[in-house]
Image: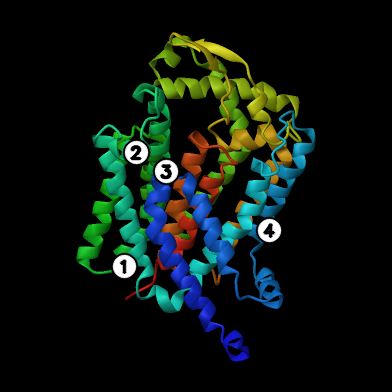
Amino acid sequence: MAGILQNRDWIAKKNYILLIIMFVALPFMAHAGGLGIAAIVALSGLLGVIGFWPKHIKNFLHRVPKSIWMIFVLLFWGWFSVLWSPYKNSDILNNAVKILFGMPVYLGCAAMICAQNKYTHNILPWLFIASLVGSIIAVLFDLTTNYSLTLLVDPLANGETLASRHGDMVQNVGHAVSVLVLFVIPISVFLWQKNMPAKFFAILLILAVGICTHLANASAAQIGLLVALIFMGLAIVHSKFALKSAFLMAGACLLFAPILAFLPANLSSEVRAKLPFSWEERVFNWEALYEKIVEHPLIGHGFDAVRTFNNTHTIRGFDERALVSLHPHNAGLHLWVEVGLVGILLACIALFFGARQLSGKGGLSHSRQIAASGLCAATTIMASISYGVWQDWWWASIILAVATVSFANTYT
């Protein structure tokens, strides 16, 4: 028994098997609105710890980058801000707790992926590609058959109509499309390192994901994919500059987000009427948040406070529409409103440390910087016009995609 415990190779094999299972299940989890990704990544991270002694975990913690520690400081600040938040939730497993305790296990899963060098040469990148292809097929099938796959797995309940379910189905598939954008970026770089057929396949995957974003009318994912490709193209020529620029863009989107909330006040009703409906709602949403930011600019209104902003308005004939929805559809505004300038500065410091480490000496290789540049750019865009900051599936998806950047430079 002692000999088995001393042989740490069994842990690597165990984690390798866990990752295989996770990648096989990934298309199903991603298609369920992406919500299952948080669960499966967290479970993999928890099981991955089995076999490590406290001293090994202590040694691992000493190698955690400053950027990750700053993210945890931000999350602790968000959790602490519950004290002055007007939103009260008696659930033990509330959003603040899920994010705070979910992050370590998400990162544990990412560490498992990055540590599988011995086995990654065999199957993991290709299995991840197979999962990506499966997800693309599932999304395309749903979008071209009026969500028949979703309805097959989750049929309408008695008395439930297709119209009443339609909004949820659109949202779930939209989430899945965003996940596809994140995953296709590192995978396309991995394939681009191979032979010509692999390069052609990488192009096909990008086109397929682009078609998914179009059919789903997921404008945030569309723009995110386009900007990612621009930054990846720039990174081919100058990877460090592109990577630093992507992180700089992320920081600027957070720090200067109040400007985005202030500008809509100058838009005329004619201009607003010409916008797509979802974008006009965003404009009203962001405009309403400016006053909230001014009220508590330093520490914000507290975690999940946005959920208590219940003013309504009429837009394009729809009455009683929430002026501010459950989240602002903008990461910068979300942080400014709920955790204030303190939270914004913590996030920007984390980005600074991340950019410095990844682009500096001993950081990422050229190909991995290309993947990281595109991934940072896509995440920044989608987070700036679509998702809330505290969505656990979004955090888990980003971390999983970041971990697969390690596949670049991996050859069979």
Asked whether residue 358 is in view, the answer is no
Relative horizontal placement of residue 75, taking residue 1 as reference (left or right):
right
Q: Name the residue under label 3.
A: 32
Relative horizontal placement of residue 378, taking residue 151 as reference (left or right):
right
**Callout 1: few (<14), some (14-19), or many (20+) C-alpha neighbours within 10 Å?**
some
Q: Which amino acid does label 1 sit on?
A: Gln
Q: Is mark 4 on a helix, strand or loop?
A: helix
The image position of residue 325, as x and y in percent, is 56, 25
The image position of residue 399, as x and y in percent, is 52, 55
Depth check, front residue: 209 or 239: 209
Depth check, front residue: 253 or 81: 81
Q: Mark 1 points at which residue?
A: 193
Dot 2 or dot 3, earlier in sequence = 3
Q: How far is mark 2 from mark 3, CA to CA?
A: 8 Å
Dot 4 or dot 3, earlier in sequence = 3
The image position of residue 70, as x and y in percent, is 68, 55
Relative horizontal placement of residue 278, taking residue 50 as reference (left or right):
left
Q: Name the residue under label 2.
A: 150
The image's mark for residue 69 is 4
The answer to whether 242 is drawn above or below residue 7 in the figure is above
Nearer the observer: mark 1 or 2; the answer is 2
Q: Would you identify the image quadrant in which residue 236 lies?
A: bottom left
Discs 1, 2 touching: Cβ within 8 Å? no
Q: What element carries label 1?
A: loop
Q: How far is mark 2 from mark 4, CA to CA?
A: 39 Å
